[in-house]
Image (cartoon, coloured by chain):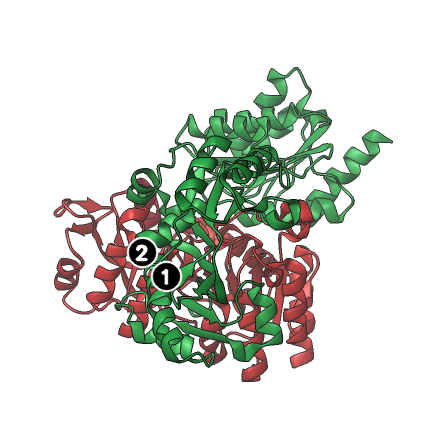
Amino acid sequence: MSILLSKDTTFIVQGITGREAVNLTKECLDYGSKIVGGVTPGRKGREVHGVPVFDTVAQAVEHHGGPIDGSVVTVPPAFTKDAVLEAIENGIKLIVIVTERIPRGDVAQMVELAEMRGARIIGPNCLGLIVPEVCKMGGIGGPAKDAAKAYQPGRVGVMSRSGGMTTEISSSLTQAGLGVSTAVSIGGDAIIGSTYAELMPYFEADEQTEAIVIYTEPGGRMEAQLAEWVKDNNSRLPIVAFMAGKFMDDEEMKGMSFGHAGTIVEGKEDTATEKIARLEAAGIRVVERIDEIPDVVKEKLGAAA
Amino acid sequence: MRFYEYEARKIVELAGIPVTKYGFCTSADEARKVAEEIGGPVVIKSQVLTGGRMKAGGVKFADTPDEAAQHAEEILKLEINGHMPRGVLVDPKAEVKQEYYASVVWDGTAKKPLMLFSDMGGIDIEEVAETHPDHVGKGHVSNLLPIGDFEAKQVVAATGVTGSQLNRATPVLARLARLFRDNDMTLAEINPLAELTDGSFVALDAHMEMENEAVGRQKKLLRKELGIAEDDTRETYEPSDFEKNVAAIDAADHRGVIQGKDHGFTGNLGLVIGAGGGSLTLTDAVRNQGGQPANYSEIGGNPSVAKACGLAKEVLEKDGVEKIAVMMSIVSNTRVDIVARGVIKACLELGKDPGETIAIFRIPGAWEDEGFKILEKYGVEYCDRSVSMWEAAGRAVSKIQGAAA
């Protein structure tokens, strides 16, 4: 089992003829993902690694002969909103937005339409998601052989605001023999399509997932929302969290942004110290060192058994 | 992007919200003229991008144009929290009956703009929310649907405000919400929103911030309406030479992305690290093991050898830097061998021994075998993913401490 993806998941790549998108398409195809089309306006009739390119999402759906499950959107920031709305209005239910530097107002509009249509957005500013040995949707983990090295099937669900750290943490879980059920790079922006708390019900319903690891940073209220969710839902899943960017709590770093657009301390509640306190109050174990994660997960799993 | 008060007032005015007849001045003579035109008692306010103006003496009252000119002259020379004023705002001294508060901010959890209103204006809203929650009205607006006046009315009414005050405040809050959405603001605040003795409502002070990512598409407002120059980026602090140099190296080559910051860092261990989350994790790991970073940096998106070399050179040339640590989380796009070549080249070009200068090289992932071969040749200590980011940072710290001892 897994969340959001299965071996039958079909998706398209919007902006498929861009340099990064061409690489991403090859990586996903090599991994065994089912990419059924690509869209770049004005490039209909071309092929990218054997994937047919269309002008519109509607043409891709028609060519496929039925609904398409997902789309990976990798187009410049000024065109992202329109591309995502096009995907949603053509019945696509899972959208991964790779693009970064999209204004918040645009993201909020996309998310609101997605909610109205029952679609889910992952990102923006993310690398997508992966179910080891089943499906990879986005650049997560890189080329198929590298992704296979870092992501082996297993018991732990991973959610991370950093794309690179999704792979770093998953690799340590793989090395420790725990493996990964599904890993989601949720994105580093201030407003994102799917937060930790919004993805928790999927992991909760997934039998394969026995524990959750999250990677988090200063900025925003996402951790407070997760803490609330955990308190309200009596979750069966132990959660282990790692908080990076504690140095940003220093007085001279106030108002500065590091790492990701959403990583900026604007108020008292945004600081690493405050977030750690909130997570711990909800029973979430926050580890001090990144390399403690696998052992603490094992400890939690042992306690649960 | 932050705005000065005189600009924020203009933005509010453009949205159809009443303001007093104010004037922005950069000299005492101009201030005298504006005070004459206003004809009556005035307030002179320093135009700085920082708080605490009142306390610092940046806000003064004057009864005559001459007095206004005198105050303006003083305030124009007054530095507040390290900021020199851009000018002064001369404003009629308003006859205020009551002060209200109106703002719109992002609610990242609801993913919608949030309207806030209070009949206890002029003071810190967070404090009001804590001590008098029944005096703060809140309501979300849609990102897609038109914003109705009734939505603002509900928020105002929730604080108990009724009568003509309700009917005057409602359009102000609704227009504030529309301008927030239309202009890509991250904060749109009027505090105080004043009810004058004649019953009219005016914005006496306004605070606006625009999202940096949207600056490119808000040119009409920024350049045409407000006359803000393209290079007036309003950073929270003046970039250092290191920061400027790294930005220039990054801009010179489209392959990959590098970033460097040294504001607030004064240590002896140079960091050539990546990417976003990895850099945050590694900076903490160095500090928490007693190391003193000389800088923060980010490498990502597969930079060229020249770019990696450029960043490493800038770090190595910083005052007090003795060694560099080259570390990243597992890379799948950036190539290990290219970064290895870049940092070794930087050492050699500066006449330094890579084996001595690079305290540790920990970048696992794409092309690592090729990268490790090069590092071995130059005697650089490297490690793969079996050594955690924490441990790699620790090795770098103990090396530099060993060297210093």
Q: How crowded is mark 2: few (under 14 residues within 10 Å), some or many (20 or more)?
A: some
Quote the CA–CA distance across marks 2 and 1.
7 Å
- In this view of the protein, which residue sits in the foreground, B294 or A23? B294
Q: Position of residue B20 (x, y in %)?
A: 40, 53
CB under 8 Å between discs 2 and 1: yes
Q: Chain A is drawn in which colour?
A: red
- In this view of the protein, which residue sits in the foreground, A34 or A159? A159
Above or below A299: residue B2: above
Q: Mark 2 lies on which chain?
A: B
Q: Position of residue A7 (x, y in %)?
A: 34, 67
Chain letter, colour green: B
Tag shown at residue B336: none
Above or below B186: residue A2: below
Q: What element carries label 1?
A: helix
Residue A171 sits in quarter:
bottom right
What type is the residue that disc 1 sits on?
Answer: Leu
Above or below A22: residue B167: below
Asked whether, in this view, residue A192 is left or right of residue B317, the answer is left
- Measuring 77% from the left and 33% from the top, which residue is drawn there? B400
Asked whether, in this view, residue A260 is left or right of residue B81, the answer is left
- Measuring 58% from the left and 71% from the top, which residue is drawn there? B128
Q: What element carries label 2?
A: loop
- Measuring 51% from the left and 53% from the top, which residue is drawn there? A149
Q: Earlier in the sequence, mark 2 or mark 1?
A: 2
Residue wearing tag 1: B176
Residue wearing tag 2: B15
Residue B240 seen in render: yes
What type is the residue that disc 2 sits on?
Answer: Ala
- In this view of the protein, which residue sits in the foreground, A143 or A22? A22
Asked whether, in this view, residue A23 is left or right of residue A174, the answer is left
Q: Mark 1 lies on which chain?
A: B
